[in-house]
Image (spheres, grey):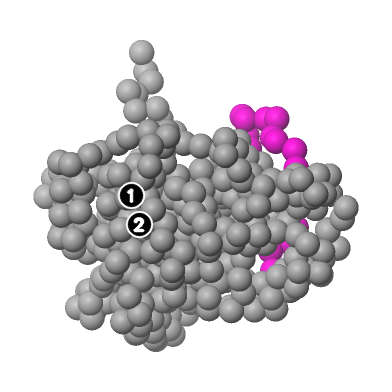
Amino acid sequence: MSITPLMPVYPRCDVRPVEGDGCHLITEDGRRLLDFASGIAVNSLGHSHPALIEAIQSQAAKLMHVSNMYGSPQGERLAQMIVDTTFADTVFFTNSGAEAVECAIKTARAYHQREGGDPKRTEIITFSMAFHGRTMATISASNQDKMHKGFLPLLPGFKYVEFDDLEAARAAVGPHTAGFLVEPIQGEGGIRPASQEFLTGLRDICDEQDLMLVLDEVQCGVGRTGKLYAHELYDVQPDILATAKGIAGGFPLGACLATEKGAQGMGFGSHGSTYGGNPLAMAAGEAVWKIISDEAFLADVTARGERLRGALEQFIGNHSDLFELVRGKGLMLGLKMKVESRPFYEHLRDHHDLMTVAAADNTIRVLPPLVIEDAHIDEFMQKLSAGAASYKVPEAA
Ligand code: PLP
């Protein structure tokens, strides 16, 4: 048999972490890497944060899981915290980002299929280079052929339009449109922030035509941009929002947030999840939310983001052969390269003990834990500079 016990769907690299220590990862063979990837924007509090460990350990000793058929004091507590600090009036907890997006899609359709709604409005308009997850609905929501290959047929009910093109979005709306699904800052797509006009314009179209504005903030949410959610930077409110990744700092948790209006179609029995929102996940989420929703913490993320961005801007000025620009918000930054970005990401990882994340559009994603300090930024810049100085662009094959 040649297949590996772990289904070979990931091209895994030789870095094999066995321990985390704050903003560093320690590998099986004793390497210590600076982690400016955070498990792709997940380890918001870094590794082994005492508050998160304490919350998980003590809840695990008390009660890990019960059915969602029972009352949930733990879920009510976290949902209330989220409702108190965001646009949302109600929350459905999931175990992952894709499930949160699935719930968001269902919620948008259910809005139109509720009694008195307009049930022919089933189609969701999505945008080029988007990433919404790997389930059948979430791959169908993305225009990327590489994610579709081998899994056809796609689910119907999605229409793709160019990202950040408001006129194209407006032109795509028809009698079957249910709403828009959009990342305010595309993550996998290469840290590409939507323009203010685009997001404001989508909101206006939704208001004019009674459509749902669904935001996918799985990657850009939970404090990453210096606001709890990136849409706050734009002063644009969604009807429905999907969140996950950083929300429980590494414990699997996601959520679909909605306004009361947006959630009108979601009644008893309309949706569910065995694990979603179990007491252990709620304890992890609560520990993270308490820290991240604090205004002073968010202000620190903004300040660290500005310092890191300033250092990156200066750095790319010295390496104009390799780098084109810096983009993103807060601690969700992208270095767009003039050459292919993946080999440079591998070079940093293999030769400079630095973890970043490669993304589309030849971008290196810089996604540190939100708790980094100045010393980590200094260490990052020193490793990045050494990496750029020693880098030889591979010859085209
Ligand atoms: N949406 C966005 C914007 C993402 O970046 C991701 C994951 O990278 C997802 C959805 C899917 O999340 P998950 O992998 O937890 O299912």
* Closer to us: 327 or 231: 231
Return the x and y of residue 120 as percentages of the image width and height.
84, 44
Q: Amino acid at mark 1?
A: Pro
| Contact, mark 2 vs mark 1 (Cβ under 8 Å) | yes
Residue at the image point whose x is 36% and y is 57% from the top: 78
In front of the other: 104 or 5: 104
Residue under label 2: 77
Q: Is residue 131 above or below residue 352?
A: above
Q: Position of residue 250 (x, y in %)?
A: 31, 51
Quadrant location of the N terminus? top left
Dot 1, crowdedness within 10 Å: few (<14), some or many (≥20)?
Answer: few
Q: Is residue 29 left or right of residue 388?
A: left
Q: Residue at x 75, y 38 (%)?
A: 156
Q: Is residue 199 magenta?
A: no
Vertical placement of residue 198 versus 154, above or below: below
Secondary structure of residue under mark 2:
helix
Q: Is residue 272 rendered to the left or right of residue 314?
A: right
Horizontal and vertical percent position of residue 94: 45, 45
Instruction: Name the magenta segment's main secondary structure.
Output: loop
Going 25% across and 72% down the picture, which residue do you hit? 372
Left or right, residue 97 beside residue 349: right
Q: Residue furthest top?
A: 1
Q: Which residue is mark 1?
A: 73
Q: Which residues are magenta?
A: 143-164
For label 1, the SS is: helix
Direction from residue 13 to residue 89 in the image, left or right: right
- Which residue shows up at 61% across the image and 46% down it? 266
Residue 366 sits in which quadrant? Answer: bottom left
Q: Would you place residue 287 above or below residue 266 in this image?
A: below
**Residue 267 visible:** yes
